[in-house]
Amino acid sequence: MFVIGLAAIQDSVTLRNDLTDTIRLTELTASINYYCYQDSTVYSQTFYTSEALPSEILAEQSETYQIPISLPVNIAGGYINPVIEAKTDRWIVQELRWRVSERATDANLKFFVESPSTATSNTLLLAFAAVLWAGAVAFVGFLVYTRKARLTPHS
């Protein structure tokens, strides 16, 4: 068994070998499953590591690998569920050979995406609410000022 950790902001994956034997990474992928709120469509795209494989990870050691991920800039609102998958071989000292050992996955992360159009409309809505609030405050201030002006006795 080994542990997968994802640092999605940097497009990197850290693999920790918690075995007493050396493991050899033979394949590392990040599948991006994108769920669109607008039309309930699921989109999938798979990205591969840019590192040279196979790569060995010694017992009780960690290695970090890059997986370049590029998604469209005009993505609609929804959420992304990245699935990281690593295929490894395990060095069997007694046999002096590699044996296919694991196909570990990590699918526990979710990232929420706000589309540019949603962000723009939210910004406009916020600006409109701010202007409306400022107008209401100015109107109440005007009413309070004029009321004080009327209640002040003239000598």
Image (spheres, rainbow, N blue to C red):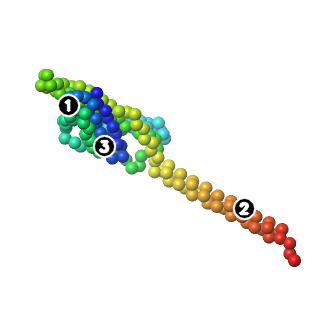
Q: Is residue 114 above or below residue 33?
A: below
The image quadrant of residue 80 is top left
- Residue at the image position 47 percent from the left and 36 percent from the top: 40
Q: Are marks 1 and 2 in contact (CB under 8 Å)?
A: no
Q: Is residue 138 above or below residue 110?
A: below
As rendered, which of 106 and 58 lies closer to the eye? 58
**Mark 3 — residue?**
12
Callout 2: SS:
helix
Outermost residue, left direction? 96
**Mark 1 — residue?**
22
Q: Position of residue 1 (x, y in %)?
A: 28, 27
Amino acid type for the residue under numbered disc 1: Thr
Left or right of 4: which side holds 97?
A: left
Callout 3: SS:
strand
The crowd level at tag 2 (other Cα within 10 Å; few <14, some 14-19, many 20+) is few
Q: Where is residue 78 in the image (x, y as percent from the top left)?
A: 46, 41
Outermost residue, bottom direction? 155
Left or right of 47: which side holds 37?
A: right
Nearer the viewer's eye, disc 3 or disc 1? Answer: 1
* Label annotation for residue 140: 2
The Cα–Cα distance between marks 1 and 2, rounded to whole angstroms, is 74 Å
